[in-house]
Amino acid sequence: MVKQVPDTKRIIGNAMKEDGTVNRSALPAIFNPEDLHALELALSLKDRYEGTVTVLTMGPPSAAEVLRESLYRGADKAFLITDRKFAGADTLATSYTLAKAIRKIEPDFDLVVCGRQAIDGDTAQVGPQTAEKLGIPQISYVENIDKLEDGKITTKRVIKNGAEWVRCPMPMLMTVVESANEPRPPRAKRLMKYKNAATVLELDNLLHKFPEFQDQESLKNYLQKKGLLIPIITVADLKVEEERIGLKGSPTRVKKIDSVVLAGGELKIFESSDEAVQELIHELVEDYIVS
């Protein structure tokens, strides 16, 4: 699972709507950083053990861009889950929709891999909630895959002040941290092959680029024949309860957003002496900063 997110390093004044949801049209969009590491981990597993990497994302039609990015890097298949009824979903509604989509697209999956969290919400909830709705075990904060054998996977996961190794039967879900790997760059050959991959929602724009096709239907047939048509999944394709999707299915409400500016407090200078160091340690212990 991957996600297209607003570039939170380039926040501007109208980044939030009045209802507390993100104004995505006002911000540049990027591939969620930790999802790139998750994709790399999935591709490296494919390199070691063979298999197929299927990428899906839920978002507006423009989210097809992260799917093309995934195809450039080595993904085998890509799906866009999009529908106006999915808009405004919080982690509860999103994970419900994603679980339904996974069961429809790849009912016999072995692994679901995603980034630990998205930089637009920083909740780290979608992965674990999706696992719960799929009814499968999960390992969070995965940094490395040691081995995969006899239907079980052994992973290294980071924890506070260290790491632990966990073995888990498949199918299962894992969330991946940034330190897991260095994502491979897009491959030139795949970029040339998939640069015109598109969903049916992008055919109008693509038709301007290829006027030799008389209409969208002929262009769609051409893309399908070449394996360049990215399938879309809508509400009509999933057997979902509509009260559990989108804004309607999202109990989360953002009441207020404040800009937090961290500023230094009082400054105290200690001399370079044993007595001064002892005094500093004493004050840190008294303030429960160290123990």
Image: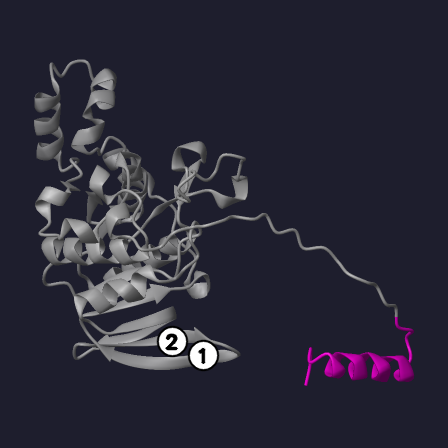
Q: In this figure, which residue is indicated by the disc labeled 1? A: 163
The quadrant the N terminus occupies is: bottom left
User: Which residue is at 56% across, 48% downward?
Assistant: 258
Residue 290 magenta: yes
User: Which residue is at 24% across, 52% downward?
Assistant: 249
Report the amino acid beneath label 2. Lys
Q: How is the image coloured?
A: one colour
* Left or right of residue 242, residue 9 in this image: right
* Left or right of residue 162, residue 140 in this image: left
- The relative height of residue 220 versus residue 24 in the rendered view (above or below) is above
Residue contact between numbered discs 2 and 1, judged by CB atoms under 8 Å: yes
Which contiguous range is marked in magenta? 270-291
Q: SS for tag 2?
A: strand
Q: Nearer the viewer, residue 105 or 129?
A: 129
Image location (x, y in percent) of residue 268: 86, 67
Residue 199 magenta: no
Name the disc covering residue 214, or none. Answer: none
Q: SS for tag 1?
A: strand
Q: In this figure, which residue is indicated by the disc labeled 2? A: 156
Corner quadrant of residue 64:
top left
How many labels sit on residues?
Answer: 2
Residue 252 visible here? yes
Image location (x, y in percent) of residue 224: 10, 34
User: Closer to the N terminus: mark 2 or mark 1?
Assistant: 2
Give the Cα separation between the discs numbered 2 and 1: 7 Å
Q: Nearer the viewer, residue 29 or 286?
A: 286
Mark 2 Cα shell of 10 Å, populated few (<14), some (14-19), many (≥20)? some
